[in-house]
């Protein structure tokens, strides 16, 4: 919202320069992002929270300034000369849907002269970003920016039967709005109609058939109050957002409607002349008594930790319109009587409903900087979450491997989510999504990881390693289910070119190796073939916790691989992308049990010995099975088994491949003898031959 510094001075006599005013308002919760220069003077760019519709006009901001500087706020008191003829004799108003329109006022001005606005008004509106139309329409916009309450002017002569009916739209009803577009209306929408058709979308935009033109002579002036939820839904459904809808959807002041009507009538008479008929048609079925709220010093002390003088409390609340009255208080711990005030909530502050809200009003105007910094007393001992240690170790290892953590919003496009959604998974859909491409909760972390990779690639970041610890969501019947998952994403170069090194592109082996290092915290992984359809069939795999992991039961806990080309093209990813996802709860459980079973041993004093075995194995025999066979022999001196080299082709028979396996032996008691090593090697070769059909390759 744009605020003209000089306009505020029409309501308050203050001398604070714009920069000081900016600082004071921002400290009081009315954020001023910037100060701009305009032909109408300094322009304050206010960033208002949605609960402060009262500040969507200069008068509301002026009220805040007056409270900050303890100055008197000048009342808006329009002076209009009315004809003896009453407006009720000429027109009438009926509200059929009071749940959508809680108040509607109408005034009639006859004999106006519609013309271009004077320079002062045109320049003022243009400074606020509003184009000048004509003197009558500009008067309604001026009052909206002044008081924060929208009004609307109809050409009275175009209204059929010269009456106003506030009703719901009829099925299939259409109307052309002031922007020239024909809009299809729906029955839940509130419209302003005459005796024949809809002439405005209530609280949002008027109709083209009744707009004020230079030939208009008689003006019906509307000032009303509309249900904020209805305005918000209608605006979103129609894709139509206006200055008026912005104010009504946040909750305009119903009591301001009559004042805004009189002020607008006064301005139209000054700018366009004419005769104002006596009185106003005011249909007000939604009138409510002001709520009473009590503020006690006990609560103020409890929340803020410091006292505020009675005089300051009463001055602040009075300036903000709460009309505080002293009442009998409660006794404090010392036995002294603590003050209390009964306040009446003003109609423009519907966001204030509890005592804590009044505490905030006092605190922000007294000055948060005047309260000492302190922590509230802890009522319960603090304790870390059960999986906190495992999560910390996991995060440390991923960062050590070169990954950067990201946090994404789990609301995603349903079409993108469907790419990675497993069969039979029912997604959780938003009832009232903010956008169509953010209408379901992700069923896989890969969908948001792919989006993050795409965004970075489009912004020139080619080499990426990202991870996210988040949740996925789905429905099981009517029951929502959340699953903690770790998602990895990588693309580009695994090793960048340097003086002594050549560049190397990231490959499936890299992400597989990273996952093995991560899972080593919980006993390791067992890899197997097969992967979802969205992964490259030859560069992907599933994995379960290793038999060495306490939680291992053979059930896959995740998958990893390169995105299939068709998926990468659909997501507009221009280079190979590798992703992985695993369920964290199983990993955390295995980590805790592995941690509990961990035992430390002294460093061995005797040397380790390595033996290499060049094996011929049938295609499809995984290295994991080789490791299992070797470890199943129960050789206590065996410390490590690793794959050193893989070779295919040449003299290797078809259907076979060569695997060089290096086995490390070490004893804690003595140096291993050649006889022991020969025995170990023989047992290993025999087991591999009998159980896997392996053969030693001639060297």
Image (cartoon, grey):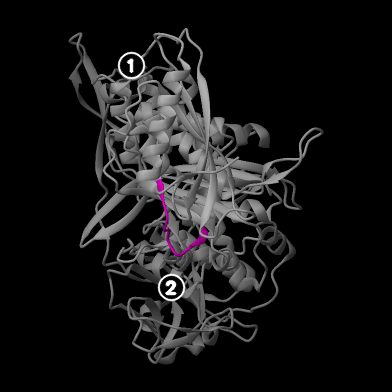
Residues packed near mark 1 inside 10 Å, few (<14), some (14 to 19) or many (20 plus): few
The residue pinned by badge 2 equals 237
User: Closest to the observer: 71 or 576?
Assistant: 576
Kindly identify the residue that appears in the image at 39 percent across and 8 percent down: 669
Q: Nearer the viewer, mark 2 or mark 1?
A: 1
Kindly identify the residue that appears in the image at 50 percent across and 34 percent down: 642
User: Closest to the observer: 149 or 571?
Assistant: 571
Residue ranking furthest to the right: 499
Q: Is residue 468 visible?
A: yes
User: Is 286 on the left or on the right of 153, as rendered?
Assistant: left
Q: Secondary structure at mark 2?
A: helix
Q: How many marks?
A: 2
- Closer to the chain start, of discs 2 and 1, is 2
The residue pinned by badge 1 equals 599
**Residue 450 within the magenta-colored segment of the rendering:** no
Identify the image quadrant of residue 271. Answer: bottom right
Q: Position of residue 415 (x, y in %)?
A: 46, 68
Vertical relation: 156 (above or below) 299 = below
Q: Secondary structure at mark 1?
A: loop
User: Closest to the observer: 288 or 157?
Assistant: 288
Vertical relation: 558 (above or below) 438 = above
Identify the image quadrant of residue 630. Answer: top left
User: Closest to the observer: 287 or 437?
Assistant: 437
Q: Position of residue 74 (x, y in %)?
A: 51, 44
Question: Which portion, as a residue range, is magenta?
Answer: 527-538
Vertical relation: 307 (above or below) 66 = above
Residues packed near mark 2 inside 10 Å, few (<14), some (14 to 19) or many (20 plus): few
Q: Position of residue 73 (x, y in %)?
A: 50, 41
User: Is 558 on the left or on the right of 656, as rendered?
Assistant: left
Q: Position of residue 277 (x, y in %)?
A: 45, 75
Labelled disc at residue 119:
none
Q: Is residue 10 visible?
A: no
């Amino acid at each position: 919202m744009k605020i003209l510094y000089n306009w505020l001075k029409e309501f308050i006599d203050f001398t604070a320069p714009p920069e000081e005013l900016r600082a004071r308002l921002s400290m009081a919760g009315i954020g001023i992002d910037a100060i701009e220069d305009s032909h109408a003077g300094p322009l304050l760019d206010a960033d208002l929270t949605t609960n402060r519709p009262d500040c969507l006009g200069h008068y509301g901001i002026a009220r805040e300034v007056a409270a900050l500087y303890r100055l008197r706020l000048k009342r808006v008191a329009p002076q209009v000369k009315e004809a003896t003829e009453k407006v009720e004799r000429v027109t009438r108003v009926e509200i059929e849907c009071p749940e959508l329109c809680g108040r509607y006022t109408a005034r009639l001005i006859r004999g106006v002269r519609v013309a271009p606005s004077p320079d002062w008004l045109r320049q003022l509106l243009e400074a606020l970003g509003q184009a000048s139309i004509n003197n009558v329409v500009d008067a309604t916009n001026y009052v909206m920016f002044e008081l924060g309450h929208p009004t609307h002017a109809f050409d009275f002569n175009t209204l059929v039967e010269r009456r106003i009916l506030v009703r719901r739209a009829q099925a299939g009803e259409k109307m052309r709005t002031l922007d020239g577009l024909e809009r299809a209306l729906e029955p839940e929408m509130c419209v302003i109609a005459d005796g024949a058709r809809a002439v405005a979308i209530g609280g949002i935009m008027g109709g083209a058939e009744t707009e004020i033109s230079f030939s208009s002579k008689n003006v019906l002036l509307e000032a009303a109050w509309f249900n904020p939820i209805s305005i918000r839904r209608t605006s979103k459904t129609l894709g139509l957002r206006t200055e008026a809808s912005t104010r009504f959807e946040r909750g305009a002041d119903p009591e301001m409607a009559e004042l805004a009507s009189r002020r607008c009538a006064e301005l139209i008479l000054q700018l366009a002349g004419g005769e104002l008929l006596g009185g106003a048609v005011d249909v007000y079925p939604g009138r409510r008594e002001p709520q009473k709220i009590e503020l006690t010093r006990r609560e103020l002390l409890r929340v803020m930790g410091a006292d505020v003088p009675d005089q300051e409390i009463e001055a602040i609340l009075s300036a903000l319109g709460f009309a505080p009255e002293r009442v009998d208080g409660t006794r404090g711990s010392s036995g002294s009587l603590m003050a209390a005030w009964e306040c009446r909530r003003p109609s423009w502050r519907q966001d204030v409903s509890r005592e804590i809200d009044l505490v905030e009003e006092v605190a922000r105007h007294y000055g948060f900087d005047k309260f000492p910094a302190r922590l509230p007393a802890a009522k319960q001992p603090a304790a870390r979450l059960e999986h906190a240690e495992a999560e910390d170790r996991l995060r440390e290892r991923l960062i050590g491997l070169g990954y950067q953590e990201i946090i994404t919003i789990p609301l995603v496009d349903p079409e993108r989510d469907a790419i990675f959604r497993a069969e039979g998974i029912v997604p959780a859909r938003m009832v009232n999504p903010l956008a169509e491409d953010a209408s379901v909760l992700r069923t896989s972390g890969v969908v948001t990881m792919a989006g993050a990779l795409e965004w970075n690639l489009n912004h020139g970041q080619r080499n990426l390693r990202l991870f996210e610890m988040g949740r996925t969501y789905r429905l099981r019947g009517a029951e929502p289910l959340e699953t903690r998952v770790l998602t990895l994403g990588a693309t580009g170069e695994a090793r960048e070119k340097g003086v002594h090194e050549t560049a190397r592109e990231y490959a499936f082996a890299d992400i597989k190796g990273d996952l093995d290092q991560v899972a080593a915290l919980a006993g390791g992984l067992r890899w197997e073939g097969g992967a979802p359809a969205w992964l490259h069939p030859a560069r992907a795999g599933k994995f379960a916790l290793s038999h060495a992991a306490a939680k291992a039961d053979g059930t896959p806990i995740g998958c990893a691989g390169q995105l299939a080309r068709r998926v990468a093209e659909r997501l507009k990813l221009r280079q190979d992308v590798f992703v992985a996802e695993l369920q964290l709860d199983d990993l955390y459980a295995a980590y805790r049990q592995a941690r509990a079973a961990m035992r430390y041993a002294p460093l061995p004093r005797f040397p380790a010995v390595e033996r290499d075995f060049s094996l011929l194995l049938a295609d499809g025999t995984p290295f994991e099975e080789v490791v299992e066979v070797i470890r199943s022999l129960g050789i206590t001196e065996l410390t490590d088994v690793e794959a050193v080299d893989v070779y295919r082709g040449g003299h290797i028979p078809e259907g076979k491949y060569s695997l060089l396996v290096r086995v490390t032996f070490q004893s804690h008691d003595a140096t291993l003898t050649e006889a022991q090593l020969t025995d170990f090697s023989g047992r290993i070769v025999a087991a591999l031959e009998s159980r896997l059909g392996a053969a030693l390759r001639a060297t």
